[in-house]
Image: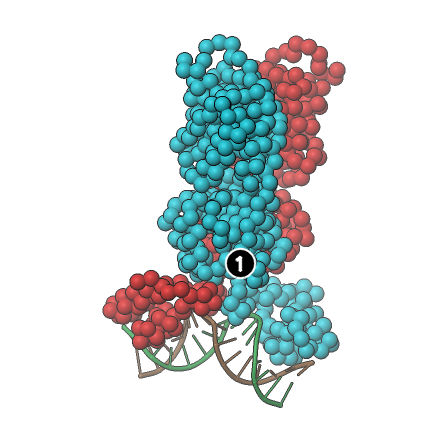
Chain colours: A red, B cyan, C green, D brown
DNA sequence: CTGTTAGCGCGTTCAG
DNA sequence: CTGAACGCGCTAACAG
């Protein structure tokens, strides 16, 4: 016996099923929520009728009385790039498993939009907020103070200790990378960064410098930060400087940049990894399958998203704000090798 | 004058602002919604107080009375792969611009989950549904009948003409690709497909066969469909067969497969594009920047998402179910070239 | 164990 | 032009 055709605005409510069962609506509510004192007979009867009528409780009405929406608001700069996509996928999965809904909003890194989103979250009475990779403390404060709900940050380090967050331990991961590179014999390094995500960029750049200072104190190190539109273009654009500076090993802020850099290097006659070793950061799906498989630091992106949900729910259940660090793992593939001399031209400064 | 600290469950309502303004709640409602008869003086006064109190209307309460949620439910197999990510990004953008919220749910291609999602959408009383790249008619019917709201499909062709959808015109795009390949002199073709998205795979494979039948009637054509876990692996795994069959040009179902295939080809000593020309489908961000930039068919993925929202809203506003086809554009880069003979071994059948 | 009542925050009558 | 009253669908508190 299936439910009959009904229009969306003619949904069956507990009143309908109460009438059909000859009981009071509140009894239906109790039966459905498996609450306290309820006769087994009436309960099963009610459940059966609900089933037959194709009843689905209105989350809206429920939220109105319970004052909980079971919704987590998520702000991210975009949903379109591969890093976000995985994190967001992890968030959606874990939230779904824990019976929470997710309200995604993209900020496009625009402060005005962030304010709009905060207001929007408030209108929808989200129970908590997850902020992905937005690198301004201000954003955190904005959501924290206007919404007054738990907030968890994903994927960035912030020194202040009272902010809940989950992030990859950049320092350890990058130290592994440097150790690998130094072991290969490299002494002329570059860090290829980004200009529009200052927090995480600085963290990685700093980690890189520190690790080199420790593992190869006399090495040369330069930092390149281009202001192109996309990360791929940032990588492409930094090739010339790397070539002219006689760099033999480059740590990139992420895989996209590495791909751009490698492409430009090959086109300009630089062999990878012969003349230039390149290390990425992220380990995108595609990175292992590139024609020259990319050596990179793997970020557990889905896991970051899932953990963010766990942290947020823990706080909702009365736990403390905690910070969780996951380890990034160096995956050595084929874009790193011992340095070889270049055959023709392109010496440092030439 | 900013709003004072208030807990989430102590939000300001129209009652608070009515009290502060010395008027009736319904007056506040009218002022806020810019409705009919309302004194300019009282209106501005009320607006000012609302502002000062940091008032944000409860979307929940509003939905309860208006019986509209301004929410679009979106089902997609995942949010994590680059194709979905862009489409979903487009949906989110356009919905946001039109003042709609989006409720994303991932089906993981699991029929049980699809049912759960349908029920969940019903609980949340979504106003409409967008189904992305789920290739079973059954899914469409499921959402259509249980929810009784407008449904729009994205990214797949379905012959039945009464289903609203937006998709890329595969036939025209693939015909361009074949024309390009035939013009280059190729006569031994393969289509490298997928097994888990039968609808769109068949559409593209068929388009490929038809185009070849028309443009190079005597050419050889084989179809390879591997059942690996990821698309990249499907590409990798199909290399051997392509090599043995003496194929010189392969059209792949998407870019991921093309990347896998190219990687395997190069490793096995096949030159790309010398011995094997490869055409992808999608034009991922990364495709232009691969060491051998990929020739591919560009799908306007964000645009697909945006258009889906437009279609859905048009129906909500009383318009007819319409179908919208966007054109995919062949982008010729460097993985296609005239066929050259292989130098050593690996002849057909060897 | 079950029925009654009230109220969540808002929009919408219908009177004034 | 504005106030009073009702209902959206559900849960919770209190009776019986």
Quadrant location of the C terminus of chain A in the rendered image: top right
Give the quadrant of the N terminus of chain A.
bottom left
Q: Is residue A14 above or below residue A287?
A: below
Residue B123 % position (x, y): 44, 61
> Taking the image as drawn, is residue A72 in sight?
no
* B77 versus A235 height, above or below: below
Quick check: A111 left or right of B125? right
Q: Is residue A134 left or right of residue B129?
A: right
Residue B85 drawn at (x, y percent): 54, 42
Given residues B54 and A287, the one toward you in this image is A287
Where is residue A323? Give x, y as percent: 51, 45
Front one among A27 and B71: B71
Q: How many marks?
A: 1
Identify the residue position indicated by label 1 in the image: B71
Q: Residue at x 48, y 9 (%)?
A: B344
List the single residue furthest toward the right. Answer: A350
> Going 42% across and 66% down the picture, which residue do you hit?
A6
Instruction: Report the residue at 63% width, 77% height from top.
Output: B27
Residue A2's x, y, as percent? 33, 62
- Say what secondary structure mark 1 lies in: strand
In which chain is the residue bearing label 1? B
Residue drawn 65% across and 35% down?
A230
Please indicate whether residue B2 sits to the left or right of residue B239 in the image. right
Choose between A177 and A240: the one closer to the eye: A240
Mark 1 Cα-neighbour bin, 10 Å: few <14, some 14–19, many ≥20:
some
Does residue B234 show up? yes
């Amino acid at each position: 016996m299936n439910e009959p055709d009904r229009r969306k605005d003619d949904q069956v409510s507990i009143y309908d099923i109460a009438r059909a069962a000859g009981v009071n609506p509140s009894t239906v509510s109790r039966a459905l929520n498996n609450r306290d004192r309820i006769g087994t007979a009436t309960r099963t009867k009610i459940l059966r009728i609900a089933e037959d009528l194709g009843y689905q409780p209105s989350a809206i009405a429920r939220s109105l009385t319970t004052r909980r929406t079971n919704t987590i608001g998520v702000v991210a700069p975009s949903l379109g790039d591969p890093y976000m996509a995985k994190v967001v996928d992890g968030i959606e999965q874990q939230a779904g498993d824990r019976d929470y809904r997710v309200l995604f909003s993209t900020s496009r890194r625009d402060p005005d939009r962030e304010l709009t989103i905060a207001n929007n979250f408030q209108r929808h009475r989200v129970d908590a907020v997850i902020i992905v990779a937005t690198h301004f403390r201000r954003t955190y404060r904005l959501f924290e103070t206007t919404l007054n709900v738990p907030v968890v940050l994903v994927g960035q380090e912030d020194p202040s200790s009272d902010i809940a967050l989950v992030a990859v331990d950049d320092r350890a991961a990058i130290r592994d990378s440097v150790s690998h590179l130094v072991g290969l014999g490299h002494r002329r390094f570059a860090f290829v960064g980004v200009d529009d995500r200052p927090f995480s960029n600085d963290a990685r750049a700093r980690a890189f410098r520190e690790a080199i200072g420790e593992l190869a104190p006399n090495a040369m190190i330069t930092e390149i930060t281009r202001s192109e539109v996309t990360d791929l273009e940032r990588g492409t654009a930094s090739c010339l400087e790397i070539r002219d500076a006689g760099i033999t090993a480059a740590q990139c802020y992420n895989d996209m940049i590495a791909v751009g850099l490698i492409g430009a290097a090959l086109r300009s006659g630089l062999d990878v990894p012969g003349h230039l070793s390149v290390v990425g950061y992220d380990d995108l799906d595609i990175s292992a399958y590139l024609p020259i498989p990319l050596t990179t630091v793997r970020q557990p992106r889905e896991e970051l998203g899932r953990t963010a949900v766990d942290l947020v729910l823990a706080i909702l259940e009365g736990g403390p704000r905690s910070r969780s660090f996951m380890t990034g793992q160096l995956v050595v593939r084929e874009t790193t090798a011992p340095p070889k001399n270049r055959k023709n031209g392109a010496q440092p400064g030439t």
